[in-house]
Amino acid sequence: MAKKKSKNNSKGQKKPALSPYRFMREKARTLPVGKCYIAPPDWLDSGMAHIVVTRVRPSGNLVMASFLVDTFCLGVKDAGYHENMTPSDFEEYLNNYRKGMGLEEISYNEAHNIIYGAMAFAEEGGIKPSKEFDPAGYILEEDTDDIPLIEYDFGKNGKHFLVVNPDRKEMPYYHTLKKNLGDDFEYVMPYGEDVDNEDFEDDDEESPFSDITLKDVKKALDGMLKMKEESDRYPDEKYTYQYPDYPQTLSVKNQFIADELLSPDNYSCLPREVIDRILALPKDEAAQDISNVMLYSIGKTYKGINDDTIESWNNSAIMHSLILLAQLQSDKGLDAVLEIMRQTDEFADYHLGDLTPELLHPALYACGKDNITAIEAYLSQPGLDSYLRSQAPDALAMIIFNQPERRGEIIEVFRRLLNNMVSNLPVQRACDGTFAGFVMSNLMDIDAKELIPEIKATFATDCVNRTIAGDCKNVIKDIELSRGAIHNDEYQIPDIYEQYESLKKFITKPE
């Protein structure tokens, strides 16, 4: 779904999701390889290729890394990555290349051999890959004999061919090539210029490996500053939730459920036999026991998380509970799911990390799809965290994708939500600019043409954070393009066994 953000300010010792850098280094290679692309299609002639490699997360989102490869001389000049990109955002990313230089899908083996082959060729001349290759390069398999070799002709006419642009940033490489290859390479200087010894002064191993200019950097920084200024215009709703008394002792009908969910041995994954045993119970009975475990876990951890005194809660009971409730689809789990959504973002980060959107709104959909009144009551409750609140519109969108005959009913829920926001956004009551931006993303996903007047009225408050889904014009344009069908897979409940198989590969038990 469009533009969902993850929070990275979690507290305490338990963090199921790794930082983006650690995720790339430690877990990216455990995910299945997705599609790969190259631009432009005539890269062999141009000597420059932009290669995109993907891997598929359990949620269906993508890990993506891009590599700017100079096949004539310099190897990997630049690289970047995104550890959790929605398919719709990735499609928009690809469209930029389709429009600009053309794009061609290639096999992983082709991408692998072009990248590593160009790097090896560059290293023959003493040129190392861009420092950005770490950690982006961890999306690639190790360069071993397990990957079938594909021979490509690097260089130009068999030799390293250095192109020096007018800003002369590439001149340090001339010196490196000269030192390692002697005269056995070719180069081209800007028109009317020749090699100048001054270009070699202060040359060292820290030479730049990117063609980014100061103008490019200034432009990027200006863009980041504008985005920050835009976000700062919209204050967050103040968190004022008054916590109830949570159970201090755990009471369940099926003791094995509590034992298994709270067991440190099941931190990353529930054994298949445990899953089968739970799902074989009457669904309401199982959901009630799971809900009791959730409420007990909330009560045992929320205070310590909020005041940063939490001791290690060495289990994944809340994660397992949400996954199981999504499968059971019993309304007996609704109250517990909503109570999770009334907690702070620090609470969600501590127990779920970046898995929050992957696990929370499917559970809310499964437990609440037949109790829209309860979801609307939650949406109208003031003083809650806007990021967790945004999972409720996600659940409503799931109803449209999974029960299309209920579209009219859910559109009216969104209509009431928008009408309420018109008056509540300026005072941040039961909504704020961030939440409004997330709602606009949902409306884009479901092609909510019926709500364009209400969308315009909401944007007219000048309180919608436009860094999330765009401005009013862009949101309406996206809705009118009727691209909602491409989001269908993002709003499905995954197969529980496949989900756990993927999760256990990148959830690490804390020491």
Image (cartoon, grey):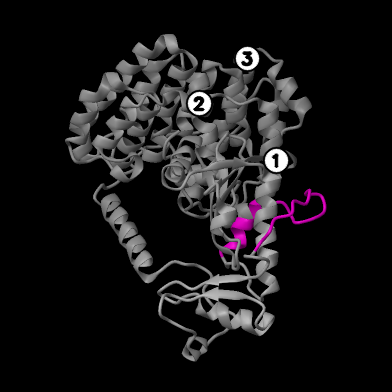
Distance Cα–Cα, label 2 vs label 1: 22 Å
Given this view, does label 3 or label 1 mark the residue nearer the observer? Answer: 1
Label 1 sits on a secondary structure element that is helix
Distance Cα–Cα, label 3 vs label 2: 22 Å
Looking at numbered disc 3 in the image, what kind of residue is underneath it?
Lys
Between discs 2 and 1, the one toward the N terminus: 2
Between discs 3 and 1, the one toward the N terminus: 3
Looking at numbered disc 1 in the image, what kind of residue is underneath it?
Lys
2 and 1 marks in contact (CB < 8 Å): no
Given this view, does label 3 or label 2 mark the residue nearer the observer? Answer: 2
- Which dot marks residue 68? none
Q: Nearer the viewer, residue 246 or 16?
A: 16
Q: Nearer the viewer, residue 318 or 364?
A: 364
What residue does disc 1 label? 504
- Which dot marks residue 283? 3
**Is 470 in the magenta?**
no
* Residue 266 left/right relative to 333: right
Q: Nearer the viewer, residue 505 or 363?
A: 505
What residue does disc 2 label? 491
3 and 2 marks in contact (CB < 8 Å): no
Indicate the position of residue 388 as horizontal and vertical percent values.
42, 37
Give me the residue at 58% from left, 35% from top: 318
Q: Which image quadrant: the C terminus?
A: bottom right
Given this view, does label 2 or label 1 mark the residue nearer the observer? Answer: 2
Label 3 sits on a secondary structure element that is helix
* Residue 105 left/right relative to 32: left
Structural crowding at the residue carrying mark 1, measured as other residues with C-alpha within 10 Å and reported as few (<14), some (14–19) or many (≥20): some
Indicate the position of residue 145 as horizontal and vertical percent values.
82, 53
Instruction: Give the residues drawn in magenta, as a range.
Output: 132-154
Give me the residue at 49% from left, 16% from top: 402
Give me the residue at 21% from left, 32% from top: 458
Q: Nearer the viewer, residue 85 or 269?
A: 85
